[in-house]
Structures are given as C-alpha cells and as structure tokens.
Image (spheres, grey):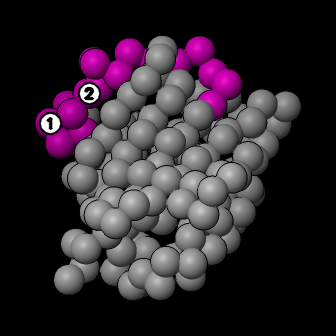
C-alpha cells in the first residue's frame, strides 16, 4: 500500500468504532493536519461506518466494514464498503422536513452531505465515498 492510501477492516460491532478513530488519528499525524479538520472527518467517518455496521451489515459480527482512505494535495477521500445488500440512495428522506423531524434515522447521511465536500454512492448502495478538502482550515 502506498503512502497516500490507508485502509482498515473491522467487524460489524459498534465497539470497533474506536479503531476507526485510531485510524483517523494516524492519517492526521502522518499529514500534520489540524483539529478542526479532524473533527469533520471523524464525524463523517463515524456516521458512515455506523450506517454500514447497522443498516448494511445489520450488526452481523461475521461481516466486515472496509474503510479506505486516499489523500492528495487538496482532498482526503474515504470509501466505506459493507457486505450488506445495499439501499436506494436516490430516495433518501430529508430529515429536516416536519414529518421526519422526530425520526431517529436519516440524519447520518444528511450530516455527511452537509459537512463533506462531496458524497457518492456506488454499486448497490453498499459503497459510500466522501471527500473533505484539506485546505479548508486555512
């Protein structure tokens, strides 16, 4: 694996989210990035990985979530892949509408859309990608 690519694979247990935080800290240490950007990345990645664990893999500890990170001069890119059956990402409810305000679900992807600099879904919806601009803190 090259210096600008990192990945981690975890089983689908929410307790493994601490491994994701260690993974992000390693990237930020390697790239000497600031804490404001760190919080954005960690929030987006935790939401994405938790969605993969809960909705994608349905908390099945025999299934894994793969997190890949790529970085270049301007962006950090993340790809989250679960072993689930996917979902219809073209038909996501808006958590800010009145009928959805009290719903527990639907906020994670909304947060990622609003915090990141781009969110994309691949395949059948079991692959999510997002990017965050590195120089946004300057």
Q: Is residue 32 above or below residue 129?
A: below
Left or right? Give the position of 20 relative to 111.
Answer: right
Measured as percent of width and height from the top left, residue 109 is found at 35, 41
Q: Is residue 52 above or below residue 47?
A: above
Q: Nearer the viewer, residue 2 or 120?
A: 2
Q: Residues within 10 Å of mark 2 (few under 14, many from 20)?
A: some
Q: Is residue 57 above or below residue 68?
A: above
Query: Which residue is tagged 1?
Result: 97
Q: What quarter of the picture does the C terminus occupy?
A: bottom left
**Of helix, strand and loop, which one carries label 1?**
loop
Measured as percent of width and height from the top left, residue 119 is found at 31, 40
Which residue is located at x 49 percent, y 53 percent?
70
Query: Which residue is tagged 2?
Result: 93
Which residue is located at x 29 percent, y 54 percent?
116
Which residue is located at x 39 percent, y 28 percent?
121
Q: Which residues are magenta?
A: 82-99
């Amino acid at each position: 694996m090259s210096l600008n690519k990192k990945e981690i694979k975890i089983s689908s247990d929410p307790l493994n989210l601490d491994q994701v935080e260690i993974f992000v800290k390693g990237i930020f240490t390697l790239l000497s990035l600031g804490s404001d950007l760190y919080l954005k990345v960690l929030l987006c990645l935790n939401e994405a990985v938790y969605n993969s664990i809960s909705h994608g893999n349905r908390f099945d500890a025999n299934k894994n979530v793969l997190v890949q990170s790529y970085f270049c001069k301007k962006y950090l890119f993340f790809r989250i892949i679960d072993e689930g059956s996917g979902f219809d990402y073209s038909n996501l409810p808006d958590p800010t509408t009145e009928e959805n305000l009290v719903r527990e679900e639907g906020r994670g992807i909304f947060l990622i859309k609003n915090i990141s600099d781009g969110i994309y879904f691949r395949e059948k919806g079991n692959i999510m990608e997002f990017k965050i601009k590195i120089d946004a803190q300057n």
